[in-house]
């Protein structure tokens, strides 16, 4: 591939960089800038046994779990806020023991991503001390010891070598194989710009062995160079750039579109029932040829109704229920 042109189709990018058993990290926060189009393609290509990293997960995580793609989830929160207290496939699979799940708390997950981006093997924190997050492990210790993709333990409690009277919690950083980050603008060479909240996405991109950028717009690199301080992800990080307008739908994407509350409400209903969820996958994932066909199915008028109003950053009066 031309190092100056990393543009690929979504099908090509997922086929090349997402494999069975990979440790996968997804961008965004709950209903904000989630890489839904990439998630649908991962499901369609039948990836299995994924180790899924998503501190603040939403319906994207829920879909992957319900489609049988996930083996281990490292996560502190999974819900489409305002539409589900807890995502339904996620809850069902955890309660029935169909997936393994570990929680380090939302703030520690964020610290872990930054540490992983810096190449650190672990970090010392105090956040979880005194809570059940230390004593109650979601993944059994023998699984940690015998799974080569996981660290040998969830955590270790040690004395601070600089202050022996103080205890610290040593937490291993994730070894991410592939991160998928949805952004507003990217150049063909991989330079990417996130507008609005960044969450932990820059760290996720930097921490992963490979990175797929999906974007609302592909722009000339000269446009991004005019304001280089606005570009968070340098061109040496992404391995693929995929042009996907509305690639975060039904989540929102700052400066582009609001979240689709009616779609999220529909998903909350169907994801609570095994038969309805399978019908949803058949209609909205397996029954769709590609992202263009997905957008056609959603409908031009509906998509245009989600376009944010300049100066507001959202759609005033949008029907969300």
Image: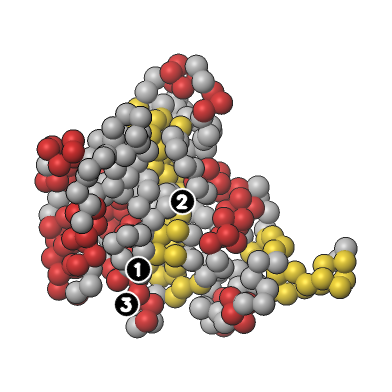
Colour pattern of the rendering:
secondary structure
Disc nearer the start of the sequence (3/1) = 1
Q: Residue at x 15, y 73 (%)?
A: 275
Q: Which mark is residue 92?
A: 3
Q: Position of residue 297 (x, y in %)?
A: 11, 46
Disc nearer the start of the sequence (1/2) = 1
**Can you tell which of label 3 and label 2 is closer to the viewer?**
3
Across the whole image, how many numbered discs are drawn on residues?
A: 3
Q: Quadrant of residue 157?
A: bottom right
Q: Is disc 1 placed on a helix, strand or loop?
A: loop
Dot 1: within a 10 Å radius of its alpha carbon, few (fewer than 14), some, or many (20 or more) residues?
Answer: few
Q: Is disc 2 placed on a helix, strand or loop?
A: strand
Marks 3 & 1, CB-CB < 8 Å contact: no
The relative height of residue 208 versus residue 135 in the rendered view (above or below) is above
Q: CA–CA distance between discs 1 and 2? A: 28 Å
244 left or right, relative to 108: left
Q: Which mark is residue 178?
A: 2
User: For this rendering, which residue is in front, 170 or 260?
Assistant: 260
Marks 3 & 2, CB-CB < 8 Å contact: no
Q: CA–CA distance between discs 3 and 1? A: 13 Å
Q: Residue at x 15, y 69 (%)?
A: 276
Disc nearer the start of the sequence (3/2) = 3
Q: Position of residue 115 (x, y in %)?
A: 64, 53
The residue lying furthest to the front in this view is 317
Q: Position of residue 111 (x, y in %)?
A: 61, 55
Q: Answer whether residue 210 is visible to the viewer in this image.
A: no
Q: CA–CA distance between discs 3 and 2? A: 26 Å
Dot 3: within a 10 Å radius of its alpha carbon, few (fewer than 14), some, or many (20 or more) residues?
Answer: some
Q: Quadrant of residue 318?
A: top left
The quadrant of the picture occupied by the C terminus is bottom left
Residue marked by disc 1: 85
Q: Residue at x 49, y 42 (%)?
A: 198
């Amino acid at each position: 591939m031309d190092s100056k042109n990393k543009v690929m189709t979504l099908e090509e990018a997922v086929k090349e960089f997402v494999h069975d058993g990979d440790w996968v990290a997804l961008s965004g926060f709950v209903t904000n800038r989630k890489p839904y189009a990439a998630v649908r393609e991962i499901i369609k290509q039948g990836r299995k046994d994924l180790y899924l990293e998503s501190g603040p997960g939403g319906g994207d995580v829920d879909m992957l779990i319900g489609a049988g793609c996930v083996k281990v989830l490292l996560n502190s929160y999974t819900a489409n806020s305002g539409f589900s207290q807890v995502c339904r496939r996620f809850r069902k699979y955890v309660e029935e023991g169909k997936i393994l799940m570990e929680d380090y708390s939302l703030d520690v997950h964020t610290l872990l991503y930054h540490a992983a981006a810096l190449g650190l093997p672990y970090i010392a924190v105090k956040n979880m001390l005194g809570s059940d997050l230390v004593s109650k492990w979601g993944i059994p210790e023998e699984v940690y010891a015998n799974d080569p993709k996981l660290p040998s333990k969830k955590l270790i409690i040690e004395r601070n070598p600089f202050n022996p009277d103080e205890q610290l919690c040593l937490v291993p950083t994730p070894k991410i194989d592939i991160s998928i980050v949805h952004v507003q603008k990217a150049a063909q060479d991989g330079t990417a710009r996130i507008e609005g909240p960044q969450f932990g996405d820059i760290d996720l991109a930097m921490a992963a062995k490979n990175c797929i950028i999906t974007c609302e717009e592909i722009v000339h690199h000269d446009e991004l160079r005019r304001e280089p301080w606005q570009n968070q992800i340098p061109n040496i990080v992404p391995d693929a750039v995929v042009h996907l307008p509305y690639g975060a739908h039904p989540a929102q994407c700052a400066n582009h579109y609001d979240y689709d509350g009616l779609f999220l409400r529909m998903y909350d209903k169907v994801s609570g029932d095994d038969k309805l969820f399978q019908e949803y996958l058949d209609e909205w994932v397996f029954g769709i040829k590609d992202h263009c066909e997905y957008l056609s199915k959603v409908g031009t008028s509906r998509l245009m109704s989600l376009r944010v109003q300049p100066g507001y950053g959202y759609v005033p009066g949008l029907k969300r229920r």
